[in-house]
């Protein structure tokens, strides 16, 4: 695959993922405040969502299968990608400015997600 082919393919996948995000967003929030569900739990909620999808992907890599058959590996990867985009929006959107976190706090959150995903035991805070 050439670099140009790769760019075209990724662009096509991103368009598909935006369409999925639009549908899912309408199930979770209102038209007037598309980030309302994310604001409710902030970055720790987002870290949890990303962590869950990461763990699901990691288990698929180990076992090669999912027990829930109506959501496959592509669904997991699409959700993970969209959660990462939503986290970026939370970081940049003026509307959620109060959710901005320092690099130090972000590193602490990332470490908690990493530790949790590798221990299988969530740390209570």
Image (cartoon, rainbow, N blue to C red):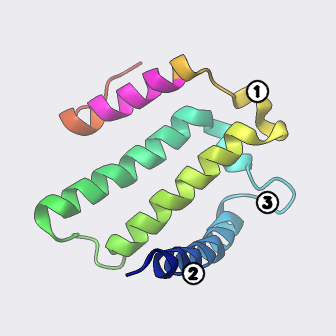
Q: On residue 12, which mark appears?
A: 2
Quarter-of-image position of residue 22: bottom right
Residue 25 in the image: x percent, y percent?
67, 64
Note whether 14 is above or below 56 in the view shown: below
Q: Residue at x 37, y 49 (%)?
A: 52
Residue 46 in the image: x percent, y percent?
54, 42
Q: Closer to the camera: disc 1 or disc 3?
A: 1
Question: Crowding near pointer 1: few (<14 within 10 Å), some, many (20+)?
Answer: few
What residue range appears in magenta?
106-115
Q: Closer to the camera: disc 2 or disc 3?
A: 2
* Placement of the C terminus among the 4 image quadrants: top left
Residue 120 is at least partly visible in this image: no
Note whether 34 is above or below 27 in the view shown: above
Residue 53 in the image: x percent, y percent?
38, 54
Element at label 1:
helix
Q: Closer to the camera: disc 2 or disc 1?
A: 2
Pointer 2 with pointer 3, Cβ within 8 A: no
Q: On residue 98, which mark appears?
A: 1
Element at label 3:
loop
Q: Residue at x 46, y 76 (%)?
A: 6
Q: Residue at x 44, y 21 (%)?
A: 108
Element at label 2:
helix
Find the residue positioned furthest to the right.
Answer: 32
Assign the magenta stretch its main secondary structure.
helix
- Is 91 displayed left or right of 121 in the figure? right
Question: Crowding near pointer 3: few (<14 within 10 Å), some, many (20+)?
Answer: few
Q: Which residue bears the numbered disc 3?
A: 30
Residue 61 in the image: x percent, y percent?
19, 61
């Amino acid at each position: 695959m050439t670099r140009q082919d790769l760019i075209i393919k990724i662009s096509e996948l991103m368009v598909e993922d935006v369409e999925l995000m639009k549908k899912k967003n309408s199930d979770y929030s209102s038209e007037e405040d598309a980030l309302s569900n994310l604001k409710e739990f902030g970055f720790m909620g987002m870290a949890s969502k990303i962590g869950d999808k990461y763990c699901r992907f990691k288990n698929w890599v180990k076992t090669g299968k999912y027990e829930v058959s109506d959501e496959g590996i592509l669904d997991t990867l699409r959700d993970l990608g969209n959660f990462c985009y939503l986290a970026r929006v939370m970081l940049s959107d003026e509307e959620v400015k109060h959710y901005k976190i320092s690099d130090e706090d972000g590193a602490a959150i990332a470490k908690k997600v990493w530790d949790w995903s590798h221990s299988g035991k969530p740390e209570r805070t």
